[in-house]
RNA sequence: GCUCUCAUAGCUCAGUUGGAUAGAGCGUUGCUUUCCUAAAGCAAAGGUCACAAGUUCGAAUCUUGUUGAGAGCACCA
């Protein structure tokens, strides 16, 4: 809000001086070095080239002719190669407090931008419980959704349910095997069967509902699949709920099959002349593939069929979509699903998934473009892998061996907020090591407590003293450098939300919280003997309480935008 | 072999999209509490931003190459 004001002033000034010039987007920044004023601007350096003048000269002109009717800028200095260091008047900084208090929980929330966005995330196969591997994309998708909403988007959160295909059939057979076992039959699990304990629980449920009716029947599979999917989805939903993650829609893959969306896509491609019959995809011939590549490994299973001309749209080779026997491959259902998403009228589609599926990105883009759809609407948030460490050793998970840590248990053991913060602290783009021992320690080594303690400390102060409201007279008492810094920081909050949403990077908000709290803690401790918040000076006390209240509001808004709870009170030893 | 991502303090990571003297947390060392919560604060130590060229007023950030790590490269889902 202050930034926008400064932008306006500088743009007006430049226009008044050089009307013929198209003013580039002015960049005003919070400098790290306090000697560089409250805000720093590099516009003079950017204008040096188009104006053909030295940056310092331009800066001088600008500072001497500032169009600043409300005298927001108290002083402007020229420094270094041509930076303008702006110092703001106390009064203009102090205005943030009433602004924040007026807006309350809405401070930092932006007006609706009439953009509809769909965020698809988790979308785990309904063949088992969620495990630790799902955690990062789940929390990221959730936080990104919250961020986009705060930034003014109308957000729909969607879970794509893979309830069709081989995997759920395997699930059905696994359930049936355990079901038979419950009636005393000796069974041998198939090689690809799911070995987990939870399958037995599902079998028990089936037995309780249907008795022994399926023992002698051949058509057991649909029923076993149905109950398997339903039970797993229920478990997934509960786990997500305990993680504070809700979805608006659960989109069934089977429903696409049911309404013939698959054959429709193929017809669409056919109409567009995008298909051809061949032994081999165009593109593979030119590509040197060594024995290590997977396609070479499986070459003997490749028989030819119907191919889609994705190589014309940026994919490295054409993709098969119908096997030689005419059955569609998995990709087609995924294409149909994305086509559906486009048809539902969103302005922006975001897919969140693990970086192990990064190969999916150019392929899906190409498939959409081959349908004549604008793939710029499609965004992929790739979440890098997490390496789990226990006792300094990497833990390897495999679903087949049943060696997994269930997300549900993990959240129960560690606490939602801790897990959430650990996963949101890092940008999605970097892989990181998750130290399990550290997460389990409920000590100050854990960054969550720092955040929450800051909020609780503010809450304590406010309950201790009666806050009677602010007016600009009183607020003029806030003149300590630390107080000015916190005012600036709070004023920057709406910008942080916007840029974090724009770049799909929730961790920025978390680092912002960390900074804001650090400033408050330092302020609090430094002045605990001299300039206490609650003092005999009633006016000063009210002004500082107003500051704390605004801080608390900003912090609580930021934390809730990430789904992290902000307690009023914290118990500890 | 090819493609993508990454490489910043002892460890885990930020770095406002090209800006001024590269930051935080943890760990290490020393200090601060009669008090509104010490789950806090202050100070110190710790860096060839993997390496080498290039682009320009200016590079951790952009380009190319090299090295190293992770992921992907079947008509599996």
Image (tube, coloured by chain):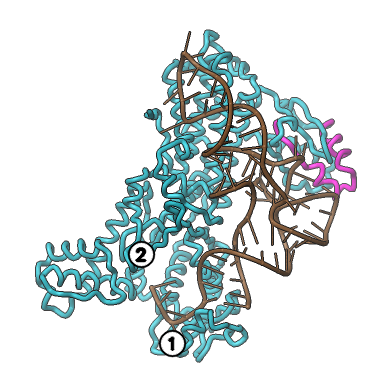
Chain colours: A cyan, B brown
Closer to the camera, A441 or A405? Answer: A441
Residue linked to disc 2: A161
Residue at image location 29% in from the left, 69% down from the top: A194
Q: Is residue A528 left or right of residue A324?
A: right
Specify the quadrant that holds the N terminus of chain A.
top right
Q: Is residue A59 magenta?
A: yes
Q: Position of residue A422 (x, y in %)?
A: 46, 46
Residue linked to disc 1: A301
For disc 1, the neighbor class at 10 Å (few under 14, some 14 to 19, many from 20) is: few
Does the magenta stretch mainly form a helix, a strand or a loop? helix
Q: Position of residue A256 (x, y in %)?
A: 36, 71
Residue at image location 48% in from the left, 83% down from the top: A297
Closer to the camera, B33 or A353? Answer: B33
Distance Cα–Cα, label 2 vs label 1: 28 Å
Residue at image location 83% in from the left, 43% down from the top: A19
Q: Magenta residues, as a range?
A: A38-64
**Chain letter behind tag 1:** A
The residue tagged with tag 2: helix, strand or loop? strand
Q: Is residue A351 magenta?
A: no
Closer to the camera, A114 or A30? Answer: A30
Closer to the camera, A73 or A429? Answer: A429
Q: Which mark is residue A491?
A: none
């Amino acid at each position: 809000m202050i930034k926008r004001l400064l932008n306006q002033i500088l743009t007006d000034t430049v226009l008044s001086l050089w009307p013929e010039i198209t003013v580039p987007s002015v960049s005003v920044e919070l400098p790290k070095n306090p000697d560089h004023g409250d805000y720093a601007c590099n516009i003079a350096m950017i204008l040096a080239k188009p104006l053909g003048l030295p940056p310092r000269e331009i800066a001088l002109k600008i500072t001497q002719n500032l169009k600043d009717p409300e005298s927001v800028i108290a002083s402007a200095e020229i420094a270094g190669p041509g930076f303008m260091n702006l110092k703001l008047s106390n009064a203009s900084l102090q205005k943030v407090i009433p602004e924040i208090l007026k807006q309350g929980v809405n401070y930092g929330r932006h007006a609706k931008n009439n953009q509809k966005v769909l965020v698809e995330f988790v979308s785990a196969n309904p063949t088992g419980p969620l495990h630790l591997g799902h955690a990062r994309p789940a929390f990221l998708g959730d936080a990104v959704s919250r961020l986009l909403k705060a930034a003014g988007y109308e957000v729909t959160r969607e879970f794509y349910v893979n309830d069709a295909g081989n995997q759920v059939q395997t699930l059905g057979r696994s359930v049936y095997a355990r079901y038979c076992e419950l009636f005393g039959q000796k069974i041998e699990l198939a090689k690809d069967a799911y070995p987990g304990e939870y399958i037995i629980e599902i079998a028990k449920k089936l037995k309780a509902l249907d008795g022994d009716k399926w023992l002698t029947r051949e058509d057991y599979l649909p029923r076993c699949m149905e109950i398997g999917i339903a039970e797993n989805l229920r478990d997934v939903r509960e786990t997500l709920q305990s993680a504070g993650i809700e979805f608006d829609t659960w989109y069934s893959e089977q429903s696409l099959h049911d309404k013939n969306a698959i054959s429709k896509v193929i017809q669409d491609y056919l109409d567009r002349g995008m298909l051809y019959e061949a032994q081999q995809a165009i593109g593979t011939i030119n590509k040197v593939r060594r024995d290590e590549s997977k396609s070479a490994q499986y070459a003997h299973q490749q028989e030819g069929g119907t191919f889609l001309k994705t190589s014309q749209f940026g994919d490295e080779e054409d993709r098969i979509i119908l096997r030689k026997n005419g059955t569609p491959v998995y990709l087609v259902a995924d294409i149909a699903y994305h086509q559906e998403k486009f048809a539902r009228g969103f302005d922006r589609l975001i897919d969140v998934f693990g970086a192990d599926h990064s190969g999916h990105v150019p392929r899906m883009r190409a498939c959409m473009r081959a349908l004549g759809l604008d793939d710029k609407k499609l965004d992929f948030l790739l979440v890098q892998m997490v390496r789990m460490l226990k006792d300094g050793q990497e833990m390897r998970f495999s679903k087949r061996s049943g060696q997994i840590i269930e997300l549900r248990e993990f959240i129960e053991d560690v606490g939602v907020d801790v897990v959430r913060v650990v996963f949101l602290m890092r940008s999605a783009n970097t892989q990181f090591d998750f130290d399990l021992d550290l997460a389990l320690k409920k000590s100050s080594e854990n960054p969550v407590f720092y955040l929450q303690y800051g909020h609780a400390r503010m809450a304590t102060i406010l309950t201790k003293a009666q806050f009677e409201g602010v007016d600009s007279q009183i607020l003029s008492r806030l003149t300590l450098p630390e107080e000015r810094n916190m005012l600036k920081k709070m004023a920057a909050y709406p910008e942080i939300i916007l840029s974090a949403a724009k770049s799909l990077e929730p961790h920025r908000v978390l680092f912002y919280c960390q900074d804001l709290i650090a400033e408050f803690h330092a302020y609090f401790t430094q002045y605990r003997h001299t300039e206490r918040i609650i003092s005999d000076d009633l006016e000063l006390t009210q002004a500082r309480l107003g500051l704390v209240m605004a801080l608390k509001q900003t912090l609580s808004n930021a934390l809730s935008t990430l789904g992290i709870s902000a307690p009023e009170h914290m118990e500890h030893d």
